[in-house]
Amino acid sequence: MTTEFDEIRPYLDEELPQIYEELIADPAFVKIVGGVLPFPFEVIAERMRACKTKLEFQKAFCYRFLRGLADSSTQGVTSNLDTLTDSTCAFTFISNHRDIILDSGFLSVLLVENGLDTVEIAIGDNLLIYPWIKKLVRINKSFIVQRALTMRQMLESSARMSRYMHYTINEKNQSIWIAQREGRAKDSNDRTQESVLKMLAMGGEGDVIDRLVEMNIVPLSISYEYDPCDYLKAKEFQLKRDVLNYKKATADDLLNMETGMFGFKGRVHFHVAPCINDQLSQIDRNLSKQDLFASVSSIIDRGIHANYRLFPNNYVAHDWLYGETRFADRYSAEEKERFEAYIAQQIGKIDINYKDEDYLRHMLLLMYANPLTNHLKCKPNE
């Protein structure tokens, strides 16, 4: 492999022994992992050293931890990943983004359970706040998306990441997961950022369509019945509304990660649409680049919106938000009452000056109504 990608790529398997020793000697890593895994740290260290590949490490540690999270914080994680019958082909899964850690984490769990290889994961370096976290995610097949750069540095970084992703799909035959946008869609109005597609089209050969076809893009819909971070997102909306130049602190990112991982999520579903290569081949290549990228974004968005798993919460929220009874046949009186109590409970968790409960309630309802709103635009008769 070229050294061009050394700064951002996952570790090579032959690099793992040295990285294990660095982690084992890091007191912060020892403290965190010792508190999470129910074994003496000496046993954890021994098991780490026994893992010769990244996939072995994932199955020994990450899979077990994430499967435990799925069992304790959800009422089941389901998928249609058994439809990915061509295991010889590497895909770029582009998904909506709900949870900082678990969108890609649960995907890898489901892939393992369907006898498929795990994915390489795009992760922003803003989340890699401690050295041990950066090392751990690179063992866990993550590659680094560099943020907070100058415009020129950002362009160079994006081009390098695009070349790396094309290399990963076409040379390593390794599937990738990337979110459809930078950061989570806080209001659940999921839209593919054209900047993500422009980045993907920087690498590869041929015109823009050829370069995107190389990536074997598969839209992936992720549906959580409950978003444990919903009240944190609502709080952030009010702070951004009321506080000039508001920005989240590092502690806020940590709280979002912890809440998202351990909070109750109800039912969770992952749904892959077919690879979009056939649809890409039908796009007029003479379109302006702006119109071309808008067309590709629309294809991915439809693939995501059409395949949401909708829950009673989504229908209750939509009726409540818009003062309707349009979907009253999709939920019982008990389900409506339970969701109303849930919303009140989440608002109660928000600690903020000049708390605007009407606004916070509106934003929470919007988060649960938007997936249904977008789904109906694709499938109006449902």
Image: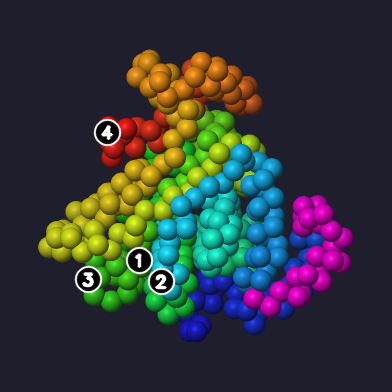
Among the two numbered marks 1 and 3 on one chain, the one whose residue lies closer to the N terminus: 3
Q: Depth check: 202 or 97 in front?
A: 97
Among the two numbered marks 3 and 2 on one chain, the one whose residue lies closer to the N terminus: 2
Report the Cα–Cα distance between label 1 and label 3.
15 Å
Instruction: Report the magenta residues as a range.
Output: 31-53
Which residue type does callout 2 highlight?
Cys
> Is 104 located above or below residue 134 in the figure?
above
Q: Residue at x 18, y 59 (%)?
A: 283
Q: Nearer the viewer, mark 1 or mark 2?
A: 2
Q: Residue at x 55, y 18 (%)?
A: 334
Q: Position of residue 168 (x, y in %)?
A: 45, 74
- Badge 3 element: loop
Q: Are marks 1 and 3 in contact (CB under 8 Å)?
A: no
Q: Nearer the viewer, mark 3 or mark 2?
A: 2
Which residue type does callout 1 highlight?
Asn
- Residue that numbered label 3 is attached to: 207
Magenta highlight on residue 63: no
Q: Are marks 2 and 4 in contact (CB under 8 Å)?
A: no
Report the Cα–Cα distance between label 2 and label 4.
33 Å
> Is 275 located above or below residue 267 in the figure?
below
- Residue that numbered label 1 is attached to: 216
Report the Cα–Cα distance between label 3 and label 4.
35 Å
Among the two numbered marks 3 and 4 on one chain, the one whose residue lies closer to the N terminus: 3
Report the Cα–Cα distance between label 1 and label 4.
28 Å
- In this image, 83 relative to 13: left or right? left
Residue 224 seen by the camera: yes
Report the Cα–Cα distance between label 1 and label 2.
8 Å
Q: Residues within 10 Å of mark 1 (few under 14, many from 20)?
A: many
Q: Residues within 10 Å of mark 2 (few under 14, many from 20)?
A: few
Q: Quadrant of residue 285?
A: bottom left
- Residue that numbered label 2 is attached to: 89
Report the Cα–Cα distance between label 3 and label 2.
22 Å
